[in-house]
Image (tube, rainbow, N blue to C red):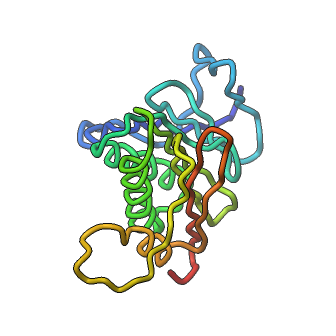
Amino acid sequence: MGGQLVTFSHVGDEDDRAAGVSSAATPIPPRLKPIEDTQVRERPEACSVGVLATGLVTSRPTGPPAYSQTLPREARTAGVARRLVRTALTLWGLESLTEDATLVITELVSNAVDHSRLPSIRVIVSRPSANAVRVGVVDRSRAVPILRTDSNGDQARGRGLLLVDTLTEDWGTELYRWGKQVWAELRQGAPA
């Protein structure tokens, strides 16, 4: 695989930078082979590969594969989801979206934790275009979230989707026979 470059990243291990673990591009060692479902292709541009919690993941400049992780339906899951989003955005060179995207994924995870039925959710981060990211949370509830527009200042909860609506270019819900995905898209250079 002469000349192909990869970037290694560890989700959830922010101490790597302090310990001096480099995320600089390095050639793939010949002894490393991708897992069966992962394709690593020779191409003129560099191909990023991240080692996530469950194995080797390939990231192309745009489009799939996306980064995703199944997580417990617990409040602490929001922190893991934020790290996954930060890692993907860094690998894709979309760091300017990090602050808004991490706020959005926190709200989506919080909604899934509060309203889903089963003990796990799936967080997905994809890149629909060169300057955009789509974050989503899949759960087993078919209840569609509703954007509240009332201005009841006494209500401490229930306004998270207003934040999502404000920070994103678009958001929505995809219904499945067994549940749903609530997603949001952020675009670099787009007015929030």
Of 4 and 139, which appears nearest the observer?
139
Question: Is 108 placed above or below 159 here?
Answer: above
12 relative position to 55: left or right: left
Among the 4 quarters of the image, the one containing residue 53: top left
Residue at point 34% right, 42% down? Answer: 77
Name above or below for residue 29 compared with residue 81: above
Please count the marks in the image.
Answer: 0
Q: Position of residue 148 (x, y in %)?
A: 44, 75
Percent of width and height locating residue 63: 70, 50
Residue 44 is drawn in which quadrant?
Answer: top right
The residue furthest top is 31
Residue 51 at x, y percent in the picture: 49, 31
Q: On the image, which quarter does residue 150 sit in?
A: bottom left
Name which residue lies at 52% across and 36% down.
50
Please give left or right for residue 150 compared with residue 179 in the image.
Answer: left
- As rendered, which of 57 and 42 lies closer to the eye? 57
Q: Which quadrant holds the N terminus?
A: top right
Residue 43 drawn at (x, y percent): 77, 41
Name the one closer to the observer, 40 or 20.
40
Q: Residue at x 41, y 73 (%)?
A: 163
| Residue appearing at x 31%, y 40% in the figure | 74
